Amino acid sequence: MNKKTKEIIRAPIVEALKNACENPTYQFHIPGHTKGGCVLPEFRALIGNKALCVDTTDEFDNLGTLHPATGPVKEAQELAAKAFRAKRTFFLLNGSTAGNLAFGMGLTRQGQKIITNRNCHRSILTGLIISGAEPLWLTPNRLEEWGLWGSVDPANLEEMLENNDDVGLVWITNPTYEGVMSDVKTIAAVCKKYQVPLVVDEAHACLWNFSENLPTPALQFGADAVIHSLHKTGGSMSQSSMLHIAHDSLISTVTVEKALKLLQTTSPSMLLLASLDAARANLESVSGRKQIECAVSNAKYLRREIDKLKHIHHLQPASGYETDVTKVFIKADGLSGVQLESILEIDFGIEVESASDIGLLILSNIGNSKKDIEYLVKCLKKIDKSHYIGIHEDKKFMPMLEPVIKMSLREAFFCAKETVPKSEAVGRVAAEVIAECPPGIAVLLPGELITEEHLPYLVDYGFIEVVD
Ligand SMILES: Cc1ncc(COP(=O)(O)O)c(C=O)c1O
């Protein structure tokens, strides 16, 4: 772009909200705090007057509505669809969770077979409980030394589709929380071959669309629909996400829209919707793209520096899988991930995304500066040279067990239950979803046999709901 040409990227909800804020009306509608007129002074001091003024919902002040999408909201969704190369984009409140629930409710039905990876997020499982569809588990590869799930094998998917001619949907997660990628190009081709729609939970990958240095997003490989947690890595506010339907999708936009209408709030926060609008506009802009390249180069720098350390290692692409460079999973010899997390937090004031018994996850964010990463590197160098005494971790964090299924998910969820002490739960059939966040991956699902192997994942549980 010519330096003198001013970049114009529209953000209709942001513009409408600014206009409403600058031209206040006498307000006799929700939200009752009425532009902050009655809030606790400490709260006002914390978040500021402006935040209270823009905390409003749809229908008022010419801001448009979410269901159905009208006015600036409609326009913003259209701009997002264009930016993400989708036929239609829906803004989600209640995160990508809302999108997965809508897919479950709208696209699957009682008894229908759905192929999904065992390490899917709990919101997919909730979607299946709502509809009563039956998951056929696609088991990913295990990265044993990292205690992580790896990629799913397209050949396994093809075999499942070959053996089940009544699969309603393939619903995979890519990348994993820790950035391990599956071969979505081949997976999409397999789905096309069997004419089964493909939904990709791309909650952790909303940046990919905006950089040549990041992986190719699933929509470009032919996925029928995807979700993105813009709030996770894209710069929007917590809870705000997007759902995209592909051009030429096998999935009905109307069906998804209807499900969203039933599931989403009827009082959407304009602040959250504006933050989605703003995040999309920022990611498209020259400065947003620079932020993404900076996150990539910071991550590469961090990885190069970790390569020089003796006792700290990072998860890298290997044969069979690629990774998203911005998600840096590390482990330290002799320390559990939880211990390393505590050292970083208590001794150095650093907070990471998550930690497990094996390692921890660092996100190189678009909001991080090179200085942040340099400080992190400096601290890791100190830890590498210190002699911390490791304590054995009793608790396991990443469930990687083969489920023994005794009853259907929905049937077990809604059946008569009793709550028993954990010590008496082995041998019984689970009646609740146990999927700690992060990563929100199932340890146990309703209908699954509880075994001794589950116990290390249930350290924090005194009691468990089982089928009566
Ligand atoms: C793979 C995956 N999908 C969906 C979700 C739900 O996203 P949200 O927190 O935006 O509701 C998460 C949350 O961590 C996730 O990891």
Image (spheres, rainbow, N blue to C red):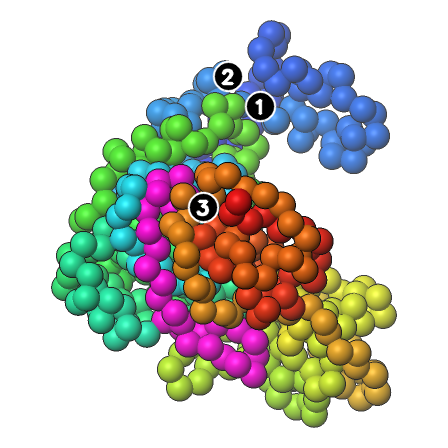
Type of amino acid under label 3: Ala
* Nearer the observer, 391 or 216: 391
Q: Mark 2 points at which residue?
A: 61
Mark 3 vs ligand 1: CB under 8 Å?
A: no
* Nearer the observer, 446 or 260: 446
Q: Where is residue 224 in the image (x, y as percent from the top left)?
A: 26, 52
**Disc number placed over residue 412 in the picture, else none:** 3
Q: Which residue is drawn at 41% across and 49% down?
A: 409
Residue 193 is drawn in which quadrant? bottom left
Regarding mark 1 in the picture, which secondary structure is present there? loop
**The N terminus, quarter of image:** bottom left
Q: How far apart are marks 1 and 3 (CA)?
A: 41 Å
Regarding mark 3 in the picture, which secondary structure is present there? helix
Type of amino acid under label 1: Thr
Q: Can residue 345 be seen in this view?
A: yes
Type of amino acid under label 2: Asp
* Nearer the observer, 136 or 79: 136
What are the residue bounds of the magenta stretch? 126-152
150 falls in the magenta region:
yes
Q: Position of residue 448 (x, y in %)?
A: 47, 57
Q: How crowded is mark 1: few (under 14 residues within 10 Å), some or many (20 or more)?
A: many
Q: Do the residues labelled 1 and 2 touch (CB within 8 Å)?
A: yes
Relative placement, left or right, of 289 versus 257 is: right
Regarding mark 2 in the picture, which secondary structure is present there? loop
Mark 1 vs ligand 1: CB under 8 Å?
A: no
Q: Which one is earlier in the sequence, the residue at label 1 or at label 2?
A: 1
Q: Where is residue 7 in the image (x, y as percent from the top left)?
A: 44, 48
Q: In this view, does 106 lie above or below 153?
A: above
Q: Mark 1 points at which residue?
A: 56
